[in-house]
Image (cartoon, helix red, strand yellow):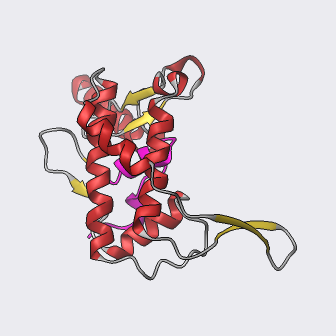
Amino acid sequence: MTGFADLRFDAGRLCLDLVATVGGRFGVEPVERLDTPDRLRDWLLASGAVPPGTSLTAVDAAWLARVRAVRDLLHRIVHAEVDGRAADPDLERVNALAATAPPALRAVRAQDGTLVRTVAAAPDCGAVVGRIARDAVELLTDPAARGQLRRCEGETCSLVYLDTSRGRRRRWCSSEVCGNRERVARHRRRAVNAR
């Protein structure tokens, strides 16, 4: 089982953060980060897919299987789009998922008087998946955002992220994760060559 710390929320979009819940380079055994219903609950809350404090007691193995299937679909679509070739059957499926109504939101007063988001009722899996699929449709149909899609250059990473850096020259999904690994590897290579 993986730890909470390795859930990633730095890809720039909800749908890309879901895709990041499976890691590793193509052709290498993937790292599963959504391995239990509890981890899925953690991800749903931490990613903002549902507002903080949302009751997710209904999340079970069936939810986990369905969200993983959607993640696999989005993984194929996003990576295909980065390569310039999104598949029409996959696009039809994500469009159908996006047509599902997302969890209805309400604005309510917190104890301190500020307005906070809550859901009108505990969301079902279809509503949550619909919200994620809608985010993917918005990303894929926005030419500016789609043009910012990049695949991490990290040796063991296949994460796709939005490059919103100045000059659009970001090479890694995260400077702290993959960027740091690359800097350490470069330092080690220089140290070996200096001997």
Q: Is residue 152 above or below residue 127?
A: above
Of 98 and 36, which appears nearest the observer?
98
Which percent across, then down, holds residue 187?
A: 34, 32
Which percent across, then down, holds residue 153?
A: 33, 29
Examine the image and state in which quarter residue 7 appears: bottom left
Quarter holding the N terminus is bottom left
Q: Does the rendering let one see residue 165?
A: yes
Residue depicted at 35% across the width and 44% down the height: 94
Q: Does the rendering let one see residue 33?
A: no
Q: For the magenta stretch, what is the residue range?
A: 1-21
Of 121 and 53, which appears nearest the observer?
121
Q: Is residue 60 left or right of residue 30?
A: right
Query: Is residue 111 a member of the stretch shown in magenta?
Result: no
Taking the view exactly as shown, the residue that stands out farthest to the right is 113
Which percent across, then down, holds residue 143?
A: 51, 22
Examine the image and state in which quarter residue 75 appears: top left
